[in-house]
Image: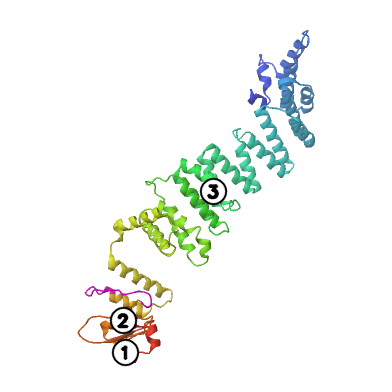
Amino acid sequence: MDERLIGKKYYETMLEDTRKHPIQALGEMFLVEQKKERSDLTAIRFAQGEVYFQHHDYEAAIFKWENIEGELGSWAKKNIADAYFELEMYSTAEDIYKSVDTNEAVLKTEVLLQLFSLYIVESRNDLASKVVKEAVEFQPDYPNVTEIARAFFEEQKDWNSAVVLAANESIRTESMGWFDVLKTYIQQGVAQSMEPDYFSTVLGSLYTLDQERFEKMTVALWKNYKYTDAYFEWLRVINNLIDTIELNHADVWDELSVYYRDAYAGLLEGTHLIKELSPVVPRLLENWLKIADGELSLFAAASTLSWNEIFPDTINALVIQDAESLLSKSPKLGGGLEAGEKLFNSIIQWAEDNDLRVGNKLKWMVEGLKDTSNFNLLLAGSTGNGKTSFIQSIVGESIAAEDHSSLVSVKDGDDLEILEITDTDSKVVEELTDLDETRRQRGTIV
């Protein structure tokens, strides 16, 4: 019946003899009903108005509908407004639409959609936006109402309204179609004006439905905020979310883990103060360690331990234990000295590629460590704890003052030889007395 009333085909329910034209059939019915002692012409008049409307006789239709009361009264009033709309008497139509007072969901929604169409025709887009939002809020499941709103917002480039619509419908319907629409908006960069926290509920809902889509939308949002003033707020939001959801250890988060890695590396580039990083980095590392897998999990564990080494007690003790356990049990940490040499050679190559010089002293030290025929013992400590006295007792003479900062390396051998190792070269020194204090402070004595 609703569909008949919307399409102005209520009259079809009254026609018994379909061979007659509706105008003729309804006219005969009118005459018969009128002769009754207690006649009710309401339904017949309503139906006649529909037929006149269908044949573009809008004035006759209005005449028939003007005195309709009862259950069909509100529909008749809406139809009168439709007739004035067709006659392009928009002001009159608008007033009548607004006067329709009904509790019927279908009728109220139809009135709102008709008002929306009227405002579009008159290019009153602000009112059109307001009334279509009212229709969506009142009856979002009404056929095509959300699609009509989406098309209008996109045409008007009202991206805030489009994003809000897509987000609300994603949560309400749990439809992957709406989640994908929202992700498209994010990828197009039209969602940057929204605060990151706005998407928390959307992401939480999506995680329970489709974890692959969750990761892709999270990455899209990460890209969306990465180079904006809201980046730190986004990191706070995503870390809060990862804290609250129950991650399945069997899940693989390769792409998201890469973004955690890049975020950590980017934050340490030196463009931010420690007071800016301290509220962000520990939780970033904790969550990175939680989702990372394979080699990235080793990076996450090493980064976590490194940060905690410099800023003790800023990361949860249980997380530190997990990081230590992960590193100690990983089969990928093999290689020892060979792996260290490979890393050092890659650093040298990188330095040369970037026109940077690796000092001779550092190269000499690495070469010494590579010599596995000797056993190396490192003696280190703060000033005044006896390092120099111990070294001098071995060498047999004074090498440097107690407060010296040079590196002294003593090697066992058959021949006595003294070398001065600096960042530029290595050369033989005949006597320790040939080294002045300045050179002792900056060099390495062997």
Amino acid type at circle 2 is Ser
Magenta stretch: give its range. Answer: 369-384
Q: Nearer the viewer, mark 3 or mark 1?
A: 1
The answer to whether residue 74 is above or below residue 243 is above
Q: Position of residue 341 (x, y in %)?
A: 31, 70
- Name the mark nearer the viewer: 2 or 1: 2
- In this rendering, the answer to whether 152 lies above or below 354 is above
Whether residue 302 is visible here, answered yes or no, is yes
Q: Residue at x 60, y 38 (%)?
A: 146
Residue that badge 3 annotates: 184
Residue located 76% across and 25% down the image: 61
Q: Is residue 295 left or right of residue 27?
A: left
Give the residue type at disc 3: Thr
Residue 236 spot, x, y in % from top left: 52, 53
Is 380 part of what is drawn in magenta?
yes
Q: Write the residue at 73% across / 26% down.
A: 53
Q: Is residue 29 magenta?
A: no
Q: Where does label 2 land, which residue?
A: 389
Determine crowd level at label 1: few under 14, some 14-19, many 20+ residues with C-alpha closer than 10 A.
some
Which mark, by number, is residue 14? none
Q: Which residue lies under the disc numbered 1?
A: 432
- Whichever of labels 3 and 1 marks the residue nearer the N terminus, that label is 3
Q: Is residue 87 visible?
A: no
Among the two numbered marks 3 and 2 on one chain, the one whose residue lies closer to the N terminus: 3
In which quadrant will I find the C terminus? bottom left
